[in-house]
Protein backbone atom coordinates (compact mmCIF):
# COMPACT_ATOMS: atom_id res chain seq x y z
CA UNK A 1 0.00 0.00 0.00
CA UNK A 2 1.45 3.36 -1.08
CA UNK A 3 -0.03 6.51 0.43
CA UNK A 4 1.00 9.97 -0.73
CA UNK A 5 0.28 12.69 1.80
CA UNK A 6 0.04 16.45 1.51
CA UNK A 7 3.47 16.98 3.07
CA UNK A 8 5.09 14.61 0.57
CA UNK A 9 3.98 16.92 -2.23
CA UNK A 10 4.07 20.43 -0.78
CA UNK A 11 6.81 20.06 1.84
CA UNK A 12 4.80 21.03 4.94
CA UNK A 13 1.88 19.56 6.91
CA UNK A 14 -1.55 20.55 5.68
CA UNK A 15 -2.40 23.95 7.16
CA UNK A 16 1.20 25.19 7.49
CA UNK A 17 2.79 27.90 5.37
CA UNK A 18 3.66 26.59 1.91
CA UNK A 19 6.88 27.81 0.27
CA UNK A 20 6.53 28.67 -3.41
CA UNK A 21 10.23 27.96 -3.79
CA UNK A 22 9.58 24.33 -2.81
CA UNK A 23 7.19 23.82 -5.69
CA UNK A 24 5.55 20.42 -6.10
CA UNK A 25 7.38 17.16 -5.40
CA UNK A 26 6.21 14.62 -7.96
CA UNK A 27 6.29 10.83 -7.65
CA UNK A 28 4.43 8.94 -10.40
CA UNK A 29 2.81 5.60 -9.71
CA UNK A 30 4.05 2.64 -11.84
CA UNK A 31 1.18 2.96 -14.34
CA UNK A 32 1.72 6.70 -14.83
CA UNK A 33 5.46 6.16 -15.08
CA UNK A 34 4.84 3.53 -17.76
CA UNK A 35 2.58 5.71 -19.89
CA UNK A 36 4.76 8.80 -19.52
CA UNK A 37 7.78 6.75 -20.54
CA UNK A 38 6.13 5.40 -23.68
CA UNK A 39 4.87 8.85 -24.70
CA UNK A 40 8.10 10.70 -23.98
CA UNK A 41 10.03 8.18 -26.09
CA UNK A 42 8.25 9.67 -29.14
CA UNK A 43 9.45 13.23 -29.92
CA UNK A 44 5.99 14.40 -31.02
CA UNK A 45 4.65 13.90 -27.50
CA UNK A 46 7.58 15.44 -25.59
CA UNK A 47 5.98 18.90 -25.21
CA UNK A 48 2.49 17.47 -24.82
CA UNK A 49 2.83 15.23 -21.75
CA UNK A 50 1.60 16.89 -18.58
CA UNK A 51 -0.49 16.20 -15.53
CA UNK A 52 1.85 16.82 -12.58
CA UNK A 53 -0.49 19.37 -11.00
CA UNK A 54 0.24 23.02 -10.16
CA UNK A 55 0.93 24.53 -6.76
CA UNK A 56 -2.07 26.82 -7.23
CA UNK A 57 -4.42 28.03 -9.95
CA UNK A 58 -5.32 31.58 -10.87
CA UNK A 59 -7.32 33.66 -10.48
CA UNK A 60 -7.65 33.60 -6.71
CA UNK A 61 -4.74 31.33 -5.67
CA UNK A 62 -6.97 28.22 -5.73
CA UNK A 63 -5.22 25.29 -4.03
CA UNK A 64 -5.80 21.55 -3.74
CA UNK A 65 -4.07 18.19 -3.39
CA UNK A 66 -5.44 15.93 -6.12
CA UNK A 67 -4.81 12.82 -8.22
CA UNK A 68 -2.32 14.69 -10.40
CA UNK A 69 -0.15 15.71 -7.44
CA UNK A 70 -0.33 12.14 -6.13
CA UNK A 71 1.16 10.77 -9.36
CA UNK A 72 -2.02 9.08 -10.50
CA UNK A 73 -2.85 10.89 -13.75
CA UNK A 74 -1.45 11.87 -17.14
CA UNK A 75 -2.65 14.70 -19.39
CA UNK A 76 -1.91 14.60 -23.13
CA UNK A 77 -2.28 18.13 -24.48
CA UNK A 78 -3.86 18.46 -27.94
CA UNK A 79 -4.82 21.72 -29.66
CA UNK A 80 -8.60 21.99 -30.15
CA UNK A 81 -7.91 24.38 -33.05
CA UNK A 82 -6.14 21.65 -35.02
CA UNK A 83 -8.19 19.07 -36.92
CA UNK A 84 -5.12 16.82 -37.04
CA UNK A 85 -4.48 16.93 -33.27
CA UNK A 86 -8.17 16.47 -32.48
CA UNK A 87 -8.26 13.44 -34.78
CA UNK A 88 -5.17 12.06 -33.06
CA UNK A 89 -6.96 12.49 -29.74
CA UNK A 90 -9.91 10.44 -30.98
CA UNK A 91 -7.64 7.61 -32.11
CA UNK A 92 -5.60 7.70 -28.90
CA UNK A 93 -8.81 7.26 -26.91
CA UNK A 94 -9.68 4.24 -29.04
CA UNK A 95 -6.18 2.83 -28.53
CA UNK A 96 -6.40 3.28 -24.75
CA UNK A 97 -9.85 1.67 -24.69
CA UNK A 98 -8.56 -1.28 -26.71
CA UNK A 99 -5.61 -1.68 -24.34
CA UNK A 100 -7.54 -1.02 -21.12
CA UNK A 101 -6.77 -4.54 -19.94
CA UNK A 102 -3.04 -3.89 -20.38
CA UNK A 103 -2.93 -0.36 -18.97
CA UNK A 104 -5.55 -1.01 -16.27
CA UNK A 105 -6.63 2.65 -16.11
CA UNK A 106 -9.63 3.68 -14.03
CA UNK A 107 -10.77 6.91 -15.71
CA UNK A 108 -10.42 8.72 -19.03
CA UNK A 109 -11.85 12.06 -20.21
CA UNK A 110 -11.62 13.75 -23.61
CA UNK A 111 -13.84 16.51 -24.95
CA UNK A 112 -17.36 15.60 -23.73
CA UNK A 113 -16.78 11.90 -23.05
CA UNK A 114 -15.75 10.16 -19.84
CA UNK A 115 -15.02 6.47 -19.40
CA UNK A 116 -14.92 5.19 -15.82
CA UNK A 117 -14.22 1.87 -14.17
CA UNK A 118 -17.36 0.70 -12.38
CA UNK A 119 -16.63 -2.59 -10.67
CA UNK A 120 -15.04 -4.68 -13.39
CA UNK A 121 -16.57 -2.72 -16.28
CA UNK A 122 -15.53 0.52 -17.95
CA UNK A 123 -18.58 2.57 -18.83
CA UNK A 124 -18.64 5.47 -21.29
CA UNK A 125 -20.94 8.42 -20.61
CA UNK A 126 -21.32 12.11 -21.32
CA UNK A 127 -18.90 14.54 -19.63
CA UNK A 128 -20.63 17.87 -19.08
CA UNK A 129 -18.21 19.73 -16.80
CA UNK A 130 -15.96 20.98 -19.63
CA UNK A 131 -12.26 21.69 -19.31
CA UNK A 132 -11.05 18.77 -21.44
CA UNK A 133 -11.34 20.06 -24.99
CA UNK A 134 -7.55 20.53 -25.18
CA UNK A 135 -6.30 17.34 -23.56
CA UNK A 136 -6.88 13.67 -22.86
CA UNK A 137 -6.95 12.98 -19.13
CA UNK A 138 -6.25 9.40 -18.08
CA UNK A 139 -5.90 8.26 -14.47
CA UNK A 140 -5.53 5.39 -12.02
CA UNK A 141 -7.27 7.19 -9.16
CA UNK A 142 -9.82 5.71 -6.74
CA UNK A 143 -11.86 8.45 -5.05
CA UNK A 144 -12.63 6.08 -2.17
CA UNK A 145 -8.95 6.11 -1.20
CA UNK A 146 -8.80 9.80 -0.29
CA UNK A 147 -8.95 11.31 3.21
CA UNK A 148 -10.07 14.93 3.45
CA UNK A 149 -9.48 17.60 6.08
CA UNK A 150 -12.47 19.91 6.43
CA UNK A 151 -12.88 23.36 7.91
CA UNK A 152 -10.09 24.94 5.87
CA UNK A 153 -10.64 28.50 4.67
CA UNK A 154 -7.10 29.43 3.63
CA UNK A 155 -3.50 28.21 3.41
CA UNK A 156 -0.63 30.73 3.64
CA UNK A 157 1.77 30.77 0.70
CA UNK A 158 5.12 32.52 0.88
CA UNK A 159 5.94 33.77 -2.60
CA UNK A 160 9.45 33.60 -3.97
CA UNK A 161 9.77 37.36 -3.45
CA UNK A 162 8.93 37.03 0.25
CA UNK A 163 5.32 38.24 0.29
CA UNK A 164 2.67 36.03 1.88
CA UNK A 165 -0.68 35.47 0.18
CA UNK A 166 -3.57 33.24 1.18
CA UNK A 167 -4.50 30.28 -0.96
CA UNK A 168 -8.09 29.02 -0.76
CA UNK A 169 -9.48 25.51 -1.32
CA UNK A 170 -10.41 24.76 -4.92
CA UNK A 171 -13.86 23.70 -3.78
CA UNK A 172 -15.68 24.20 -0.49
CA UNK A 173 -13.73 24.12 2.77
CA UNK A 174 -11.77 20.89 2.39
CA UNK A 175 -8.41 19.74 1.04
CA UNK A 176 -7.19 16.16 0.71
CA UNK A 177 -4.68 15.09 3.35
CA UNK A 178 -3.76 11.66 1.96
CA UNK A 179 -4.31 9.82 -1.33
CA UNK A 180 -3.65 6.09 -1.53
CA UNK A 181 -2.57 4.55 -4.81
CA UNK A 182 -5.19 2.18 -6.20
CA UNK A 183 -4.48 -1.46 -7.05
CA UNK A 184 -4.61 -0.53 -10.73
CA UNK A 185 -1.98 2.19 -10.19
CA UNK A 186 0.60 -0.52 -9.47
CA UNK A 187 0.32 -1.84 -13.04
CA UNK A 188 3.54 -1.61 -15.04
CA UNK A 189 3.42 -1.80 -18.85
CA UNK A 190 6.70 -0.34 -20.02
CA UNK A 191 7.83 -1.71 -23.39
CA UNK A 192 4.43 -3.27 -24.02
CA UNK A 193 4.57 -4.00 -27.78
CA UNK A 194 0.86 -3.38 -28.41
CA UNK A 195 1.03 0.10 -26.86
CA UNK A 196 4.36 0.94 -28.48
CA UNK A 197 3.21 -0.18 -31.92
CA UNK A 198 -0.14 1.57 -31.51
CA UNK A 199 1.45 4.89 -30.60
CA UNK A 200 4.05 4.68 -33.35
CA UNK A 201 1.42 3.80 -35.96
CA UNK A 202 -0.78 6.77 -35.01
CA UNK A 203 2.15 9.19 -35.15
CA UNK A 204 3.22 7.81 -38.53
CA UNK A 205 -0.31 8.57 -39.78
CA UNK A 206 -0.57 11.98 -38.16
CA UNK A 207 -2.06 14.46 -40.61
CA UNK A 208 -4.10 11.84 -42.44
CA UNK A 209 -6.11 10.42 -39.54
CA UNK A 210 -9.85 11.11 -39.84
CA UNK A 211 -11.79 12.56 -36.94
CA UNK A 212 -14.07 10.04 -35.26
CA UNK A 213 -17.50 10.29 -33.72
CA UNK A 214 -16.42 8.94 -30.34
CA UNK A 215 -19.97 9.08 -29.01
CA UNK A 216 -21.12 6.64 -31.67
CA UNK A 217 -18.01 4.48 -31.35
CA UNK A 218 -18.49 4.18 -27.57
CA UNK A 219 -22.27 3.77 -27.68
CA UNK A 220 -23.20 7.13 -26.11
CA UNK A 221 -26.56 8.30 -27.46
CA UNK A 222 -27.35 11.28 -25.21
CA UNK A 223 -27.14 14.81 -26.57
CA UNK A 224 -23.49 15.93 -26.56
CA UNK A 225 -22.13 18.81 -24.56
CA UNK A 226 -21.62 21.49 -27.19
CA UNK A 227 -18.35 23.05 -26.03
CA UNK A 228 -15.97 21.08 -28.23
CA UNK A 229 -18.40 21.23 -31.17
CA UNK A 230 -18.61 25.00 -30.75
CA UNK A 231 -14.82 25.20 -30.87
CA UNK A 232 -14.84 23.31 -34.16
CA UNK A 233 -17.61 25.46 -35.62
CA UNK A 234 -16.56 28.88 -34.37
CA UNK A 235 -15.64 31.46 -36.97
CA UNK A 236 -16.16 32.04 -40.67
CA UNK A 237 -16.76 29.34 -43.28
CA UNK A 238 -16.68 29.83 -47.03
CA UNK A 239 -19.42 28.10 -49.02
CA UNK A 240 -20.74 27.79 -52.57
CA UNK A 241 -24.36 26.71 -53.07
CA UNK A 242 -25.18 26.59 -56.77
CA UNK A 243 -24.52 30.07 -58.16
CA UNK A 244 -24.31 31.60 -54.66
CA UNK A 245 -20.96 32.19 -53.00
CA UNK A 246 -20.88 33.49 -49.45
CA UNK A 247 -20.10 32.86 -45.81
CA UNK A 248 -21.54 31.20 -42.73
CA UNK A 249 -20.30 32.52 -39.37
CA UNK A 250 -20.83 30.55 -36.15
CA UNK A 251 -20.32 31.67 -32.55
CA UNK A 252 -19.70 29.66 -29.38
CA UNK A 253 -23.15 30.37 -27.95
CA UNK A 254 -25.27 28.73 -30.67
CA UNK A 255 -25.61 31.72 -32.96
CA UNK A 256 -25.01 31.62 -36.73
CA UNK A 257 -25.54 33.96 -39.67
CA UNK A 258 -25.10 33.85 -43.42
CA UNK A 259 -24.03 36.75 -45.60
CA UNK A 260 -22.85 37.35 -49.15
CA UNK A 261 -19.56 38.69 -47.83
CA UNK A 262 -17.96 40.29 -44.75
CA UNK A 263 -19.74 43.64 -45.23
CA UNK A 264 -23.12 42.43 -46.52
CA UNK A 265 -26.30 42.23 -44.36
CA UNK A 266 -26.33 39.36 -41.86
CA UNK A 267 -29.16 36.82 -41.82
CA UNK A 268 -29.18 35.35 -38.33
CA UNK A 269 -30.20 31.96 -36.98
CA UNK A 270 -29.33 29.31 -34.39
CA UNK A 271 -27.37 26.07 -34.37
CA UNK A 272 -27.82 23.02 -32.13
CA UNK A 273 -26.23 19.58 -31.89
CA UNK A 274 -27.63 16.07 -31.61
CA UNK A 275 -25.65 12.91 -30.88
CA UNK A 276 -24.83 12.57 -34.59
CA UNK A 277 -24.98 15.97 -36.28
CA UNK A 278 -25.08 19.76 -36.10
CA UNK A 279 -28.26 21.46 -37.32
CA UNK A 280 -28.94 25.11 -38.03
CA UNK A 281 -31.65 27.26 -39.56
CA UNK A 282 -32.22 30.96 -40.13
CA UNK A 283 -34.87 33.41 -38.99
CA UNK A 284 -35.69 34.90 -42.40
CA UNK A 285 -39.46 34.78 -43.10
CA UNK A 286 -40.31 31.86 -45.34
CA UNK A 287 -36.92 30.18 -45.00
CA UNK A 288 -37.87 26.62 -44.01
CA UNK A 289 -34.47 25.05 -44.71
CA UNK A 290 -32.56 23.08 -42.09
CA UNK A 291 -28.84 22.65 -42.67
CA UNK A 292 -27.27 19.46 -41.29
CA UNK A 293 -23.61 18.60 -40.80
CA UNK A 294 -22.59 15.14 -39.51
CA UNK A 295 -20.29 14.86 -36.53
CA UNK A 296 -17.38 15.09 -36.16
CA UNK A 297 -16.86 18.51 -37.75
CA UNK A 298 -13.90 18.85 -40.11
CA UNK A 299 -12.68 22.40 -40.58
CA UNK A 300 -10.85 21.38 -43.76
CA UNK A 301 -13.95 20.26 -45.66
CA UNK A 302 -17.44 19.92 -44.19
CA UNK A 303 -20.21 18.30 -46.21
CA UNK A 304 -23.57 19.95 -45.50
CA UNK A 305 -26.98 18.61 -46.48
CA UNK A 306 -30.00 20.88 -46.81
CA UNK A 307 -33.36 19.57 -45.63
CA UNK A 308 -36.10 18.84 -46.57
CA UNK A 309 -35.00 16.24 -49.09
CA UNK A 310 -34.32 17.59 -52.54
CA UNK A 311 -32.74 20.86 -51.38
CA UNK A 312 -29.26 19.58 -52.23
CA UNK A 313 -25.91 19.62 -50.47
CA UNK A 314 -22.66 21.58 -50.54
CA UNK A 315 -19.18 21.72 -49.08
CA UNK A 316 -17.88 24.48 -46.86
CA UNK A 317 -14.41 25.10 -45.44
CA UNK A 318 -13.16 27.10 -42.48
CA UNK A 319 -11.71 30.43 -43.57
Image: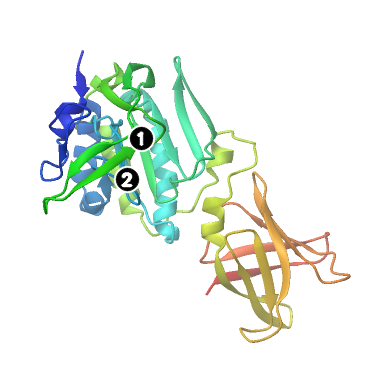
Instruction: Give left or right: position of 225 versus 116.
Output: right
Which residue reaches farthest right? 286
Residue 147 x/y as whole percent: 31, 18
Residue for badge 2: 76
**Residue 235 sits in which quadrant?**
bottom right
- Name the residue located 70 percent from the left edge and 78 percent from the top edge: 266
Judge by depth and name the residue closer to the eye, 282 or 42.
Answer: 282
Q: From the viewer's perspective, tell me whether residue 55 is left or right of residue 83.
A: left
Q: 311 above or below 92?
A: below
Image x and y of residue 247, in percent:
64, 77
Q: Residue at the spot x=19%, y=17% of the render? A: 2
Label 2 secondary element = strand
Mark 2 neighbour density, 10 Å: few (under 14) some (14–19) many (20 or more): many
Tell me residue 89's x, y (percent).
41, 47
Q: Is residue 25 left or right of residue 225?
A: left
In front: 226, or 90?
226
**Label 2 close to label 1 by CB (< 8 Å):** yes
Residue 173, given in percent of the width and then of the height, sits at 38, 30
**288 and 203: which one is in front?**
288
Q: Residue at x 82, y 71 (%)?
A: 284
The structure residue drawn at horizontal position 36% and vertical position 37%, both measured from the top left corner, is 170
Q: Residues within 10 Å of mark 1 (few under 14, many from 20)?
A: many
Q: Disc 2 and disc 1: Cα gap in Å?
A: 8 Å
Q: How is the image coloured?
A: rainbow
- Which quadrant would the N terminus be assigned to in this image? top left
Q: Which one is earlier in the sequence, the residue at label 2 or at label 1?
A: 2
Label 1 sits on a secondary structure element that is strand
Give the number of the disc on residue 138. Answer: 1
Amino acid sequence: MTVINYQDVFGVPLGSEVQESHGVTYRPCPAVDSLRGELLAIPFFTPKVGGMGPLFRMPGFKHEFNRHHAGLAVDIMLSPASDDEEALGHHLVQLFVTLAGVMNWRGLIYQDITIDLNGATRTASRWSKGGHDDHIHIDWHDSHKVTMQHGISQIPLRRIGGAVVQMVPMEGDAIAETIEWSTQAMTGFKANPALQNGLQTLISQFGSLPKLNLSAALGITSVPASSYIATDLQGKWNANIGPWSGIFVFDLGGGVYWADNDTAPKHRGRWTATSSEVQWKFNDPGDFRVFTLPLPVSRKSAQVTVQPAGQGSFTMSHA
